[in-house]
Image (tube, helix red, strand yellow):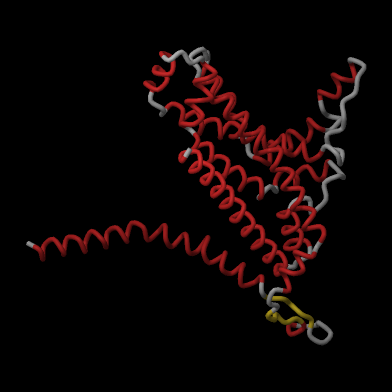
Amino acid sequence: MSTTASSLRRRTNRSAYAFIAPAAVCFLLFLAIPILYAIYISFRREVVVGLGLGEGGRREIWAGLDNYTDVLADPEFLASAVRVLLYGAVLVPVMLGLALLFALMLDSRRARVRRFSRIAIFLPYAVPSVISSVLWGFLYLPGTSPFHHIASALGGTLPDVLSPSLVLLAIANIGIWGGTGFNMVVLYTSLKAVPSELYEAATLDGASERQIATRVKVPMILPSLIMTAVFSIIATLQVFAEPMLLRPLANSISTTWSPLMRIYRDAFTENDIYTASAGSVLVALATFVISFGFLRLVRGQAFSQEER
């Protein structure tokens, strides 16, 4: 009997490995190996040999940490990192605040036309970032924006949101418009999973609709709120499409507005894949450190509140 059981267990294990093998192969080919190769390239550098002519005119050598030093010493890279941090400081709180507000409003017993409202709020997320950036870009341009025409007809003027002082808010607005719906759906789904008995007990205790929302609903969906915050932070540090597509419309957006734009310029404009790889590794490390640090901070505060 034991022999039969062990033979069945081995066959089951082989079947399980066969099922996960395609996913494992895809992970190795399209994720693990490219990451390892990028890390390897980041420690290399190409130098000119002799006159630099012919096949042997250039040679790849070991550069150590020189590429990382060059990236960190570049004032444009540091300036782009500061811009992205400011961008995230605007985008993440506003987007998550609106998502939480909409989710609470839709979960309210007084809410009407919930299905239409959910679709209307979620719909911008279904629009690709390329299309949404072009769409908002034309809405921002004074020559094509209907808002500027309406303000002009009324005898007023609107500020140029693509100016150097407002362009960060213009880019953040595109991210807020496109990301609020997705986060709202995540939070709303979590609210629907909360037992209704908790709401009924709070109502019997005399709690108002606002008190139920702030003291019952929000604490119950805190894990989902933390998850959406982490995803939003990661997406913020990887901002690329919005400023890249708005750049032809605004002189205030440089080719190094964000770290990923600088990496793109190094790799595909200046053909310096070594420095670009080093920048990519630094952005990946920064994303991991900030996301992990945020999780540790939130988890530590949660534990301290539970102890109290």
Image quadrant occupied by the N terminus? bottom left
* Residue 267 figure quarter: bottom right
* Residue 268 figure quarter: bottom right
Position in image of residue 95 (x %, y %) = 64, 34
State left or right for residue 14 relative to residue 107: left
Residue at 66 percent of width and 40 percent of height: 129
Would you place residue 97 above or below residue 254 in this image?
Answer: above
Of all residues shown, which one is farthest toward the right? 155
Position in image of residue 89 (x %, y %) = 70, 41
Residue at 77 percent of width and 68 percent of height: 70
* Residue 66 figure quarter: bottom right
Position in image of residue 64 (x %, y %) = 68, 77
Residue sitting nearer the eye, 1 or 193: 193
State left or right for residue 195 relative to residue 184: left
State left or right for residue 288 relative to residue 239: left
Of all residues shown, which one is farthest toward the front? 308
Residue at 61 percent of width and 48 percent of height: 234
